[in-house]
Amino acid sequence: ETGVTQTPRHLVMGMTNKKSLKCEQHLGHNAMYWYKQSAKKPLELMFVYSLEERVENNSVPSRFSPECPNSSHLFLHLHTLQPEDSALYLCASSQWGAGVAFFGQGTRLTVV
Amino acid sequence: GQQLNQSPQSMFIQEGEDVSMNCTSSSIFNTWLWYKQDPGEGPVLLIALYKAGELTSNGRLTAQFGTTRKDSFLNISASIPSDVGIYFCAGQETSGSRLTFGEGTQLTVNP
């Protein structure tokens, strides 16, 4: 069983659709993160959760809505996305304050 | 915000050659990390460094935490085709601060 698991691996959605990305970690960590990875750009931190509380929201549009029901699960709810939101969305987890983060396999999102 | 300068952006080498890449920052980091990302996958942690001057190996990979604490290096010896991918450096300035990532080095290994 991998440490951080993301589903689905691939998602194609229309601009009027609503979908959710799921992340689950089995590492006993207490912090979880959403990153966006676009072509030829550094990883962009979107949201940070520590002990299920959102501690950071890096100016992410409201069409992205995170949810962290417990320390092992993280969701990213998507609605009315734009084509430029197409990217690889990565979930990561860590012990709060520690530098080392472990990533999931990512969800390749395409908005049409 | 803080940015890491990672170089080179891309490398094309022959199988068996050694590879070197580095990251520099304008401020001091307490932790340096190196990740590898295969196409369509998430980054996988290769090496973590916690102390200035530290030299750590993971198989054919060796990474060093620069003595100035503003840079780090990754070397791959005797490259093989499966070394192909994007290598990212990441750093943490202080405990609890967010990781900052470099833009990645795309490595291509020709058999």
Image (spheres, rainbow, N blue to C red):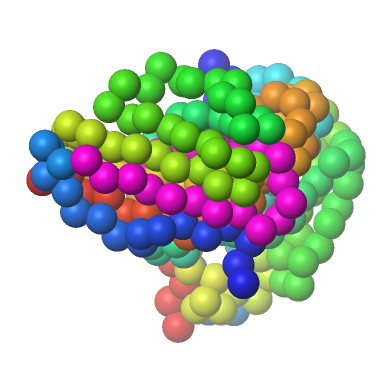
Whether residue A3 is visible, yes or no, is yes
Q: Where's the N terminus of chain A, which quadrant?
A: bottom right
User: x%, y% of residue B92?
Assistant: 71, 31
Q: Which stretch is magenta?
A: A18-40
Q: In the image, is residue B84 part of the stretch drawn in magenta?
A: no
* Nearest the eye: A108 or B73: A108
Whether residue B17 is visible, yes or no, is no
* Nearest the eye: A50 or A94: A50
User: x%, y% of residue B41?
Assistant: 45, 61
| Image height of A49 relative to B108, above or below | above
Q: Where's the C terminus of chain A, which quadrant?
A: top left
| Image height of A27 relative to B22, above or below | below
Name the residue at 61% across, 41% down. Answer: A70
Q: Main secondary structure of the magenta part?
A: strand
* Nearest the eye: B49 or A12: A12
* Nearest the eye: B106 or B44: B44
- Side of A42 relative to A18 (left or right): right
Name the residue at 41% across, 17% down. Answer: A59
Q: Quadrant of residue A37?
A: top left
Residue farthest front in this picture: A69
- Side of B104 relative to A20 (left or right): right
Q: In the image, is residue A32 part of the stretch drawn in magenta?
A: yes
